[in-house]
Each structure stands twice: as structure tokens, then as C-alpha cells.
Amino acid sequence: MAVAGGGPLSKFNGTIKGASGAKSGIETLLGTVLTGVRLVGAGLAICILSYVGIKYMLASAGERAELKNYMLRYVIGAVILISGTFIVTELIKLAQSITGT
């Protein structure tokens, strides 16, 4: 991809030296953040599920109906949180396979 005219861009081949280190640093940071979000989310999900389960066992019939409604929203939120991090991770892998990096 040489530019005609012999200017400073005439020898540019489309790659920047030293950019791979920054790219791997960003990938490492993103991987660490996604792993952290996944672990914290899973930990919170387990704690909340335990709390709601104990509360459900000790609740009266009227309170159980409320807790069932709460548990439905909880499960939907937990699935979105956990699957969201996996979806982002898979999209990153897909982008890497398409670009060949």
C-alpha cells in the first residue's frame, strides 16, 4: 500500500510497530474485567438465591406469592448478567477469528 510521490507515507505498509503490545494489554484488561464481572455476578446471584430460598421456606402463603414474583425477576436478571459476559467474550473471539489476530 505505497503512496505515490515519495512522501513520508511512501514506505507505510499498513502496520504500526509496537501496536501489538497495546493490543494485548487491552485484551488482557478486557478479559480481566469480564472475568471479574462474571465472578462477582455469580457470587451475588448465589447469595441472593440463598437468601430468597431461606425467606421462601420461612414465609407464609401470602408472602410466598410475592417471593415467587421476586424470584422470577431475579432469575431473569441473573441470566442476563451471566449470559451477557459470555456473549461479549464470544463476540471478541469471533472478531479475533475474523481479523486473524
Image (cartoon, rainbow, N blue to C red):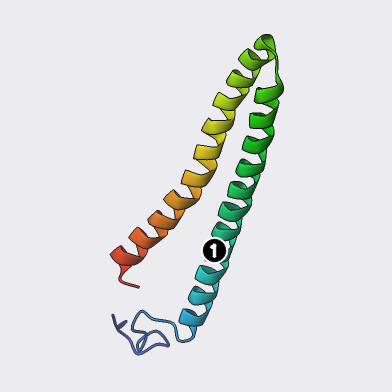
Q: Which residue is drawn at 65% across and 45% down?
A: 44
Q: Quadrant of residue 95?
A: bottom left
Tell me: residue 98, above or below residue 91: below
Instruction: Tell which of 88 and 38 is nearer to you.
Output: 38
Q: In which quarter of the image is residue 36?
A: bottom right
Local crowd size for mark 1, using a 10 Å CA cut-off: few (<14), some (14–19), many (≥20): some
Residue 89: x and y, percent? 44, 57
| Quadrant of image for the N terminus | bottom left
Instruction: Tell which of 63 and 99 is nearer to you.
Output: 63
Tell me: residue 68, above or below residue 27: above
Instruction: Tell which of 96 and 69 is nearer to you.
Output: 69
Q: Quadrant of residue 14?
A: bottom left
Tell me: residue 25, above or below residue 94: below
Residue 18: x and y, percent? 49, 85
Q: Which residue is drawn at 48% across and 80% down?
A: 19
Q: How many marks?
A: 1
The reply, left or right, for residue 77 in relation to residue 88 is right
Please tell me whether mark 1 sits on a helix, a strand or a loop: helix
Residue 3: x and y, percent? 32, 81
Residue that carries the numbered disc 1 in the rendered image: 30
Q: Residue at x 31, y 65 (%)?
A: 97
Instruction: Tell which of 89 and 3 is nearer to you.
Output: 89
- Which amino acid type corresponds to the residue marked 1 in the rendered image? Leu
Q: Which residue is drawn at 57% across and 65% down?
A: 32
